[in-house]
Amino acid sequence: MLRHNDRYFLDVVREVLKVSTNVFEGESSTGPQYKLKIFKFDLNLLAQYGWQPRISAQRSYPNIPEHVDFIRAYFELHS
């Protein structure tokens, strides 16, 4: 399951990965939170997009030039 407080990012993931499930809206202690549930998903597919585990020795910068908002959020979260 992927979660984010901005539906836009989950919609982009859903579109790029061609996931058939919908994005659901819920609540968290900090406000609205959106969820995308993915079943029977091959993590190797994410690896070809540059995904790396959260707890890894090195995490390279994802190469997604057409998503300026994602790049800005990435730096905010990982800088």
Image (spheres, helix red, strand yellow):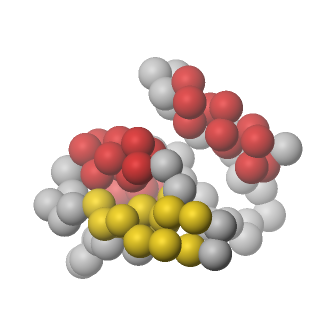
Q: Residue most toward the right?
A: 79
Identified at 80% across, 64% down, the residue is: 57
Identify which residue, 23 or 60, lies in the foreground: 23
Name the quadrant containing residue 75. Answer: top right
Residue 33 left/right relative to 13: right
Examine the rendering and report whether any part of residue 48 can be seen: no
Task: Give me the residue at 15% from left, 61% from top.
Answer: 20
The relative height of residue 43 versus residue 69 in the rendered view (above or below) is: below
Q: Is residue 65 above or below residue 73?
A: above
Q: Position of residue 23 (x, y in %)?
A: 29, 61
The spot of residue 62 in percent (x, y) is: 59, 39
* Left or right position of 47 against 21: right
Left or right: residue 31 versus residue 75 is left
Tell me the residue at 74%/49% (across/down). Answer: 77
Q: Is residue 34 visible?
A: yes
Can you say which quadrant of the picture contains the N terminus?
bottom left
Q: Nearer the viewer, residue 7 or 19?
A: 7
Label tally: 0
Quadrant occupied by the C terminus:
top right
